[in-house]
Image (cartoon, rainbow, N blue to C red):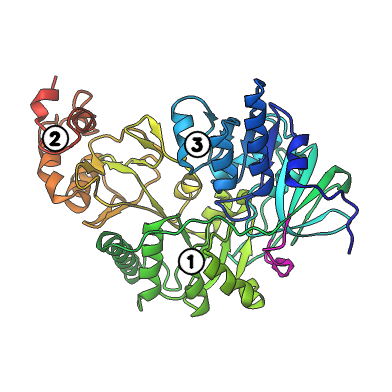
Amino acid sequence: MALPFPVLTAEEAAEMIQNEQNIGFSGFTAAGAAKAVPFALAQKARREHAAGRPFKVGVLTGASTGKSLDGALAEADAVSFRTPYQGNAVMRKQINAGNVRFFDLHLSAVAQQVRYGFLGKINWAVVEACDLTAGGGVVLSTSAGNSNTYLRLADKIIIELNARQPASLLGIHDIFEVKDPPGRGEIPIYSSSDRCGSPICVVDPKKIVGIVHTDLADESGAFDEPTPVTDQIGQNVADFLVGEIRSGRVPASFLPLQSGVGNIANAVLAALGQSTDIPAFEMFTEVLQDSVVPLIENSRCKFASTCSLTLSPAAMQKVVADIEYFKKRIVLRPQEISNNPELVRRLGIISMNTALEMDLGGNVNSTHVLGRAMMNGIGGSGDFTRNAYISIFSCPSTAKNGMISAIVPVASHIDHTEHSVNILITEQGVADLRGKDPHERARIIVEKCAHPDYREQLREYLRLLDKNIHEPMSLSMAFAMHRKFQATGDMREINWQEYCD
């Protein structure tokens, strides 16, 4: 069926976008991200710069994207500001050099901050779809992200109609947007599989200025092979949750799981799937990775609510080949819903996220290296952690061949405070911080989570502290391990006396 919208090349679409305009792009990870138009926009930026004219745009997405969006625009020096989360090395370098303004936001809050006007006007929505109707019905592709909000609020819309993503994805999405205060009501979702919205986004067709036809796969990167460390972390998480079921602290029927992104998350899910003591479970999370597909196929995962299908081409092909089976077991929601604190608290979700470093107070840094250099952003971890039934953070106990300890006296940057963090896990063991005072927390974190190369060093730090204080920390010694690393490239063999008052 012919559609009543102009058909544009990516280059023609890019020419419409002007310097200093703000663009809401589809995409949550590389899944469902716009690809052709941002790449063409980067080429336009290069031409404008070569002609001596300024050209930068504000970039809003769902989360990180792929090389054709974040990568191409960053390499063309075409980004004025970026939010809410990114994972591109060039973009990261520009952010840390102060050349790109970066707003690090909780993912559940982005859509409402856009609606409130806190982030400025949305001039354009550039959104990937797998199907489109003459009346403005948009069937999103492999993610939902913030696409529905950008489509509704943008002055003008460009649709990338991607032939690589089949129209049979219709029905996998559940598009729902909350009302703004003071008229906001509850979100009518009471289990992971509930639906409360529409399978499509409906927009004013007059705002659609054109369609760009594409045939492009999602640019999802491959994950590293499991290592003995990641496997042990996964097993420690599984063993902890088995213990919680046996103790009665977690219902025998289990609770929905949220899992972060990356190699450790894959290892954790693999261990949970293999454990005969963990019942078949549901997921209420923000990203589905390859490891979840076989869990759904063999009924270890009964249902998965997510925002994004961040799958390899092979895993995506498997899903598409049996799409009716998977549509009964997967729903894609906007991130304002998939990460919504109201639902996390209501459903009793067990959150499992990764950390860069953990401190002896139970605080977690998930975003900044040495407190200053941004990695990717907080993502959705805070949405889940603060409201979870049980919040778990895990990471290897060391980095850079043992020269960095992930367990430090005080984290160099804090994203998740001790008030929200229940459990810390490394390959060394599990520190259960529930019901522990600050001194008890510090001791158990050292004994259960720190690497043996650093354990005595951290014990010595605690021995030097005044015992008649509530919080076991020293202003003068708090960042001694970080300072040692900056000076020598190694946190080990520290002489605490050098840093004492």
Could you tell me the amino acid type at mark 2?
Tyr
Q: Residue at x 75, y 45 (%)?
A: 151
Q: Is residue 170 above or below residue 100?
A: below
Q: Nearer the viewer, mark 2 or mark 3?
A: 3
Q: Quadrant of the N terminus?
A: bottom right
Magenta stretch, residue numbers: 161-173
Label number found at residue 461: 2
Q: Is residue 432 left or right of residue 305?
A: left
Q: For mark 2, does the 10 Å Cα neighbourhood hold few (<14), some (14 to 19), or many (20 or more) residues?
A: many
Which structural element holds mark 2? helix
Q: Which badge, 3 or 1, is on the more N-terminal residue?
A: 3
- Residue 91 tag number: 3
Residue, x 18% and y 45% (percent of image)? 443
Is residue 148 or residue 22 the one in the foreground?
22
Q: Position of residue 134 (x, y in %)?
A: 88, 57
The image quarter in which residue 219 lies? bottom right
**Rendering quarter of residue 359:** top left
The stretch drawn in magenta includes residue 199: no
* Amino acid type for the residue under numbered disc 1: Asp
Amino acid on which the number 3 mark rests in the picture: Met
Q: Check disc 3: other Cα within 10 Å, few if <14, some if 14-19, many if 20+.
A: many
Please determine whether, in this image, residue 173 is positioned above or below residue 273.
above
Q: Secondary structure at mark 3?
A: helix
Please state if 377 lies on the left or on the right of 445 as rendered: right
Q: Which residue is mark 1?
A: 290
- Report the front residue among 209 and 55: 55
Whether residue 244 is situated above or below residue 13 in the rendered picture: below
Kindly report which numbered mark, 1 or 2, lies closer to the viewer in this rendering: 1
Image disc number at residue 225: none
Spatial separation of the CA atoms under disc 3 and disc 1:
26 Å
